[in-house]
Amino acid sequence: MGRGWAKGRTAATDPRIARAAAGHRGKTYARRTPRERCRWPVAGSTTLPLRWSNEMAYVVGLTATDGCLVSGRRAINFKSGDRQLVETYLALLGRTNRIKLQRTRTGGSAYFTQFHDSALYEWFRSVGLTPRKSLTLGAISVPDEFLLALVRGLLDGDGSVINKTYRADTGRRDDYYWEYLITSFNSGSRAHLDWLSGRLFNLLGLKSAVSELTTTRPRRHPYFGLRFGKRASLVLLPLLYSTGAPCLERKRAVWYAYAAKHGLSVG
């Protein structure tokens, strides 16, 4: 029987392939040669235990926003406009994969990494992540003790910390200014933001609002935002960006600058 005889055939169409598949079904296999002794380029393996922890919860939050489970290949792709965030993602997982540069449609730059890890892929799926999750993401089965680390990942991946000052248009004074602080989360799935709003209300009593966003770019599907105002942000941000917590540094810097200006503890 020549090389490549099975190409295009399946267990449903060829009894030989069906017998071979049945012989492997239910078995597990162990690597004979240690990974470090293999001759092919080694990109490392995931060393972060596949269970809930603050580090894993943060990784799940990043994957739920800027990550992608590649269907059919059980590969994991993570992309961000911030190289530092991709470096943090790999470091937490214990991996040494390459980070590649990709040009965006608008002429900007994005950084990404992609690797195969069947065990991590299936663990992600077990907690609520799915391929093509942008519009279908819903609840994530995270315990309360790790919820804030997950929320930090969601915020760093596809959220914003906004602090701006505007001059109030009172008609009588030109020295009256209004400063606001907003913490926002964005998603193509309203169900996910509704879940997030409910979990943070139950855990911290924080009130928020979910609304459909309007943009100048036409979209095929609605896009939604979850916003926490100044009062809620002053409770939430110190908990998310506590000292030493892995995070996207430029977003934490917005909160640190606000806290320094107003003499507040950063957490």
Image (cartoon, helix red, strand yellow):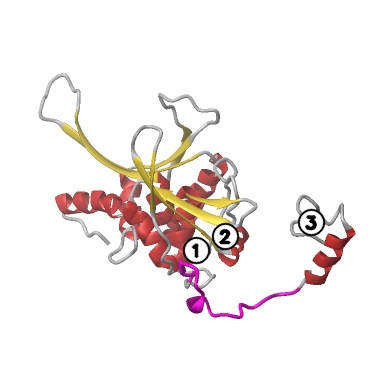
Q: Which mark is residue 144?
A: 1
**In-image side of 14 versus 262 (left or right):** right
- Asked if residue 38 lies in the magenta stretch, the reply is yes
What amino acid is labelled 2 in the image?
Answer: Phe
Give 117 or 173, whichever is nearer the viewer: 117
Asked if residue 235 shows in the view, the reply is no
Q: Residues within 10 Å of mark 2 (few under 14, many from 20)?
A: many
What amino acid is labelled 1 in the image?
Answer: Asp
Task: Report the magenta residues as a range.
Answer: 27-46
The residue to which callout 3 is attached is 5
Give 92 or 21, whichever is nearer the viewer: 21
Image quadrant where one finds the C terminus: bottom left
The residue to which callout 2 is attached is 124
Question: Between marks 2 and 3, how big is the CA–CA gap?
Answer: 36 Å
**Which residue in the rendered view is the most extreme toward the right?**
15
Which badge, 2 or 3, is on the more N-terminal residue? Answer: 3
- Mark closer to the observer (1, 3): 3
Question: Between marks 1 and 2, how big is the CA–CA gap?
Answer: 18 Å
Question: Between marks 1 and 3, how big is the CA–CA gap?
Answer: 53 Å
